[in-house]
Image (cartoon, rainbow, N blue to C red):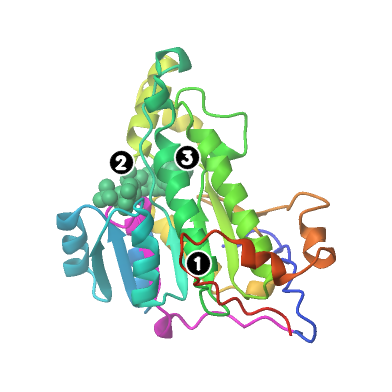
Amino acid sequence: MLTAELTPLKATPCKGDTTMTPKTDLANSTTMVVGASRGLGRGIAIAFAEAGAPVIAVARSETALNDLAREVSGIHPEVADAGDPSVAGSLIDRYDPHTLVLVAGATPLHRPIQHHTWETFSTNWHTDVRIAFHWVREALLKPLRPSSRVVVISSGAALGPGSPLSGGYAGAKATQRFIATYAQEEASRAGLEITFTALYPRGPTPLTGLGRPAVEAHAARAGQTEEEYLTRLRTPLTPEIVGAAVVELLQTDPASVAPGYVLNSAGLKPLEPPAGPPADRVQTERPVAARAAAPTGGRSRFRGRGCA
Ligand SMILES: NC(=O)c1ccc[n+]([C@@H]2O[C@H](COP(=O)([O-])OP(=O)(O)OC[C@H]3O[C@@H](n4cnc5c(N)ncnc54)[C@H](OP(=O)(O)O)[C@@H]3O)[C@@H](O)[C@H]2O)c1
């Protein structure tokens, strides 16, 4: 389903490295899906389990996670608030995942900007951005082992003119893109061989907790019925399409993976990386020593694999 030739990521700058690890053996690599109790995350967890991967499904809703684990073998539920700063480190330490998929996100309040309060406007900053920040940081600090993959589910809203009915949503999802890009740069500088990829699903889909109210709000604003609004969109994404696309991405050789992909019902399309720095800086700036300055809150967990 990859619809265009993949744009190569710059490989780690370590001297002597010639190849990156080939495609993932899913059956022997634990996949952790953060935000797996419903919607797109549930679809991703099921797709990985059906592809043979052991899956750790993380979310706050115990009943929904237990139902998921009962329905699909190979899924282990972990009830946790992924926005709690201590949760990312402890679950990564406990399960040592090869693949980390960050899907968790809040449903924004759909109303024009003047009808938001600061609290409603910033909802997605306090959930989506916060979760991406804590989990990406822990993936670098541990660090995840070489050949690990981290996928951040952003949104197509991050790439366009914004999303005027959803407050800070588009800006928060754009910040997730920066977080993934910065993390890739740090991983490359330290020779960690972790691949970070951001996905930008084009929505909204009426099939999820976040997408349904978005469809209702956009249709109402356009003076259309939901059916009329939906006919303007391409075939909406489904959790199954998103799950299959993320599994496919994980089966792709990291050396040919792009930093980001737009995802619609036709599949994944690589997003061209911005020209010039920061990619250039990876090879020209002073290497690994900067790691020592990482604020670890008293812990010294950065056991980065620098270049000899
Ligand atoms: N749906 C779309 O059309 C669309 C389009 C583009 C991008 N996206 C992005 O895709 C992601 C998933 O969207 P969705 O439509 O599937 O949403 P959804 O149906 O509302 O599901 C959100 C998931 O995130 C989990 N979650 C939220 N806060 C959490 C927390 N603090 N700790 C742990 N888990 C948490 C929820 O689980 P609990 O409540 O059980 O914790 C739930 O499993 C979001 O990041 C969204 O921005 C969606």
On screen, residue 17 versus residue 3, left or right, reads: right
| Residue placed most toward the observer, 54 or 241 | 54
Q: Residue at x 49, y 52 (%)?
A: 133
Which of the two marks, 1 or 2, is nearer to us in this view?
Answer: 1
Q: Which residues are magenta?
A: 19-43
On screen, residue 113 versus residue 273, left or right, reads: left
Label 2: element kind = loop
**Looking at the rendered structure, which numbered label has been put on residue 203?**
3
- Say whether mark 3 is within 8 Å of ligand 1: yes
- Say whether mark 2 is within 8 Å of ligand 1: yes
Q: Residue at x 45, y 55 (%)?
A: 134
Question: As shown in the figure, which amino acid type bears the numbered disc 3?
Answer: Gly
Label 1: element kind = helix
Instruction: Sort mark 1 into few (<14), some (14-19) or many (20+) by Cα contacts within 10 Å.
Output: many
Of mark 1 and mark 3, the one earlier in the sequence is 1
- Residue carrying label 1: 139
Q: Look at the image and tell me in which quarter the C terminus lies.
A: bottom right
Question: As shown in the figure, which amino acid type bears the numbered disc 1?
Answer: Ala
Query: Does residue 199 appear in the picture of this structure?
Result: yes
- Residue carrying label 2: 209
Q: Residue furthest front?
A: 298
Residue 34 part of the magenta segment? yes
Query: Does residue 237 appear in the picture of this structure?
Result: no
Q: Is residue 93 above or below residue 220?
A: below
